[in-house]
């Protein structure tokens, strides 16, 4: 069964994203006193009184605006409303009812969805008197809250969960595979998400920086459930002028942090860039599985050496992540998306692979016989035994006599021997070395 879906809507700057972050319990949506900061639908998992649900933050609705971004926000919000089981309509309790609030209320009444009216910014006895004005909207009993202070959120959620359909699943789900879609701006990350799920999940325009938040999209393929996290493109630091752009960079990095694996999207028409290597480096250093997807392959001018030339360039610049498979795709036409999903499944399985202690030590012993460990001033490195102590990424604890004798080159040799037997395609391998008695 699907999860209940709760959607937060309202005009710009009434505190929707602040409420979203408070309900989720972490700062996922960007909050800034600038209308239009939240542009896409932002999804997250949430829980109240042991009932788990999906919550969606939406961009501020401006029904009359025909500018391209507000128009796209309105379309995205409408999709979220159509998807939702329960809608939280947020209004500014201090400012009072506006004409835009009335228009939104009319839209919500026509949706025939369950709507809970949240009057935000009512954090004092004096301001709470404003609550009664909002009965005029005809949405039901308004609930006084302060998203900033966390006041009234429990009462609001009590009312929300009353409206969950009985045929929805509210149990906790730990089997999700989290995938961050990363890359520099305008390489087709959002287009890839939209192609995968078959709908316009995120706003796609030719305006660089359209995607500002890290956006979660839940998707089922075969027997697996995925969360795709679309992220704002990382720009060079000197190109980041607005505070909100800075937050986007932080959010992109945090999206990598909470993912199991990353798909690094590269523009096939321009090849791998310095920014791509920095993004890949962050994912590698944080132990994330990685797939390199070369996008826009349908419009790349090719000759018989194009494929090998681009692959060689990527391998040279991503030498630290030689384990990452490369796939040439087109988000526009859907080329090789089936191959991409096969790689996602392979990398996910490898990320969770465990090797028994006995087999691991057989591999280590054979590696030592084939290539003797280094020595220094007559003292030779001795490897006693090893065991796997973690997954995501696979982590091995190796007991040795002297840590200072374990050169990086010999560590790489041991890693290559393990990969020779078990592959571990798409995932880094982590080692920890301990001296006996530590």
Image: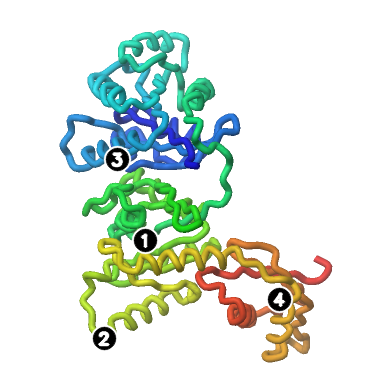
Q: Residue at 45% of width from left, 73% of height from top?
A: 325
Q: Which residue is mark 2?
A: 304
Callout 3: helix, strand or loop? helix
3D distance between C-alphas at marks 2 and 1: 27 Å
List the single residue furthest toward the right. 437
Crowd tier of the residue under label 4, counting other residues whose Cα lies within 10 Å: few below 14, some 14–19, many 20 or above: some
- Would you say 383 lies left or right of 17 here? right
3D distance between C-alphas at marks 3 and 2: 42 Å
Q: Residue at 32% of width from left, 82% of height from top?
A: 309
3D distance between C-alphas at marks 3 and 1: 23 Å
3D distance between C-alphas at marks 4 and 2: 42 Å
Q: Quadrant of residue 5?
A: top left
3D distance between C-alphas at marks 4 and 1: 36 Å
Callout 1: helix, strand or loop? loop
Q: Which residue is mark 1?
A: 183
Q: What is the x, y in percent for residue 209?
A: 29, 51
Q: Earlier in the sequence, mark 2 or mark 1?
A: 1
Q: Depth check: 66 or 122 in front?
A: 66
Crowd tier of the residue under label 3, counting other residues whose Cα lies within 10 Å: few below 14, some 14–19, many 20 or above: many
List the single residue furthest toward the front. 167
Disc 4 + disc 3, Cβ < 8 Å: no
Q: What is the x, y in percent for residue 55?
A: 44, 37
Q: Earlier in the sequence, mark 4 or mark 3?
A: 3
Callout 4: helix, strand or loop? helix
Crowd tier of the residue under label 1, counting other residues whose Cα lies within 10 Å: few below 14, some 14–19, many 20 or above: many
Q: What is the x, y in percent for residue 163?
A: 47, 25
Q: What is the x, y in percent for residue 117?
A: 39, 20
Q: Of tags 4 and 1, which is closer to the observer?
A: 4
Q: Which residue is mark 4?
A: 360
3D distance between C-alphas at marks 4 and 3: 51 Å
Q: Which residue is mark 3?
A: 76
Q: Residue at 36% of width from left, 27% of height from top?
A: 113
């Amino acid at each position: 069964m699907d999860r209940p879906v709760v959607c937060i809507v309202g005009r710009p700057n009434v505190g929707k994203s602040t409420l979203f972050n408070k309900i989720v319990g972490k700062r996922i949506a960007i909050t800034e006193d600038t209308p239009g900061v939240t542009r896409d639908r932002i999804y997250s998992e949430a829980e109240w009184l042991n009932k788990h649900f999906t919550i969606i933050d939406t961009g501020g609705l401006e029904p009359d605006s025909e500018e391209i971004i507000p128009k796209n926000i309105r379309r995205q919000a409408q999709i979220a409303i159509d998807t939702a089981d329960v809608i939280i309509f947020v209004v500014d309790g201090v400012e009072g009812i506006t004409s835009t609030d009335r228009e939104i209320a009319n839209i919500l009444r026509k949706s025939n969805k369950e709507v809970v009216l949240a009057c935000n910014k009512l954090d004092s006895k004096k301001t709470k008197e404003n609550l009664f004005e909002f009965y005029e909207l005809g949405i039901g009993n308004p609930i006084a809250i302060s998203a900033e202070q966390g006041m009234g959120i429990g009462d609001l959620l009590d009312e929300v969960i009353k409206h969950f359909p009985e045929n929805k699943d509210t149990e906790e789900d730990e089997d999700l595979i989290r995938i961050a879609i990363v890359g520099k701006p305008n390489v087709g990350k959002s287009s890839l998400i939209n192609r995968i799920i078959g709908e316009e999940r995120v706003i796609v325009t030719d305006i660089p920086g359209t995607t500002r938040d890290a956006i979660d999209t839940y998707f089922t393929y075969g027997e697996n459930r995925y969360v795709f996290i679309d992220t704002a493109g990382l720009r060079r630091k000197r190109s980041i002028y607005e505070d909100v752009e800075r937050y986007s960079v932080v959010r992109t990095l945090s999206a990598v942090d909470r993912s199991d694996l990353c798909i690094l999207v590269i523009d096939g028409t321009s090849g791998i860039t310095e920014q791509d290597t920095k993004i890949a480096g962050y994912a590698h250093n944080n132990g994330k599985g990685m797939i390199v997807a070369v996008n826009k392959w349908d419009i790349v001018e090719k000759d018989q050496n194009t494929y090998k030339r681009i692959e060689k360039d990527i391998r040279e610049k991503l030498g630290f992540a030689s384990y990452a498979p490369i796939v040439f795709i087109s988000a526009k036409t859907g080329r090789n998306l089936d191959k991409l999903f096969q790689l996602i499944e392979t990398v996910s399985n490898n990320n969770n692979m465990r090797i028994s202690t006995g087999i691991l030590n057989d591999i280590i012993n054979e590696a030592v016989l084939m290539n003797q460990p280094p020595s220094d001033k007559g003292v030779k490195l001795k490897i006693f035994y090893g065991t796997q102590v973690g997954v995501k990424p696979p982590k091995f604890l190796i007991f040795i006599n002297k840590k200072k004798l374990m050169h990086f080159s010999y560590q790489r040799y041991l890693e290559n021997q393990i990969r020779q037997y078990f592959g571990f395609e798409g995932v880094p391998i982590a080692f920890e070395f301990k001296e006996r008695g530590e």
